[in-house]
Image (spheres, helix red, strand yellow):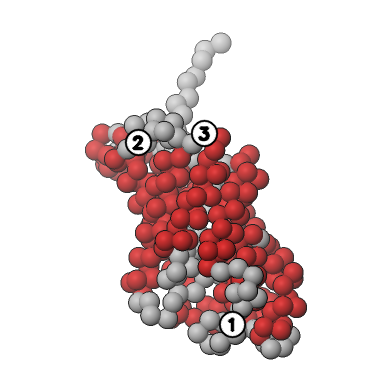
Amino acid sequence: MFGDGVVAQVVLSGGENGDYQSISWGWGLGVMLGVYTSGISGAHLNPAVTFANCVFRKFPWRKFPGYLLAQTLGAFCASLVVYANYKSAIDVYEGGSSIRTVPGYSETATAGIFCTYPAEFMTRTGMFFSEFIASALLMFLIYALKDDGNIGAGPLTPLGLFFIIFGIGACFGWETGYAINLARDFGPRVASYAVGYGSNVFKAGGYYFWIPMVAPFFGCTFGGWLYDTFLFTGESPINTPGAGFLRLAQPKRSVWSNTYEEKHNHMA
């Protein structure tokens, strides 16, 4: 709500009530407050972060589908609230209550309030790399904040995440809008389609919509691998013989599962 809300305010006011830096602030604050709110569940907020934690931090794989659904549904509902709040302003900006347009198809497009669209000059490779590198930074720095064997951030982790998101937005956000999150992008994209923006929300940017769905998984996994390879000294598949790859040659659950617990039978 904070992220889409600040974009709405900047776009619909024509830049009079905020600018690009305001968007970086708004998204940083939104993530920080989201972590404070959802800390009881782990505060992943991002399917790619959940995925990386399944790979590197013993988070149970069985929970991944539920987290993916909850994160995406949360973003979907939040974007609808933002749309309802700013509907009148959108009507004025677009030129009518029945006009809803997408970046690349109109000079007064407002679909970018809800999800990301690439700059016109971006190539497909550039789009993917931009989301990949931003996602890798995100995961690498999250692990740095959470690593008590390093400096660690402890209870200040949410504040540290504010600066991570602000920094990514300020330094790497222009080209693709730094979605770095399937749920944050796809949920609101579907919501914008549902409220009348039409199929162009998927066609824009040469069907760009799949890149923020896929690239964050590769980026976050790479970022997690980088941190565990070069800095982390705790328990991780990377810190096992063969950097975890030897597990692939031993197809036993006791070897490859990161949640396996040996069960013992006790005689009465």
Distance of mark 2 from mark 1, alpha carbons? 45 Å
Location of mark 2 (residue): 232
Residue drawn at point x = 31 percent, y = 34 percent:
239
Closest to the observer: 120 or 44? 120
Looking at this view, name the residue that lies furthest to the front: 16
State the image coordinates of residue 22 (x, y, percent, origin top left).
Answer: 57, 63
Residue drawn at point x = 69 percent, y = 79 percent:
90
Q: Is residue 207 above or below residue 41?
A: below
Q: Is residue 153 above or below residue 63?
A: above
Eye-nearest disc, 2 or 1: 1
Residue drawn at point x = 29 percent, y = 41 percent:
229
Q: Quadrant of residue 3?
A: bottom right
Q: Quadrant of residue 238?
A: top left
Under circle 3, the secondary element is helix
Distance of mark 3 from mark 2, alpha carbons? 16 Å
Location of mark 3 (residue): 154
State the image coordinates of residue 264 (x, y, percent, origin top left).
Answer: 47, 20
Distance of mark 3 from mark 1, alpha carbons? 42 Å
Q: Earlier in the sequence, mark 2 or mark 1?
A: 1
Residue 109 marker: 1
Q: Earlier in the sequence, mark 3 or mark 1?
A: 1
Instruction: Check if mark 3's residue and mark 1's residue have beta carbons within 8 Å.
Output: no
Residue type, mark 1 in image: Ala
Under circle 2, the secondary element is loop
Closest to the observer: 255 or 206? 206
State the image coordinates of residue 68 (x, y, percent, origin top left).
Answer: 56, 55
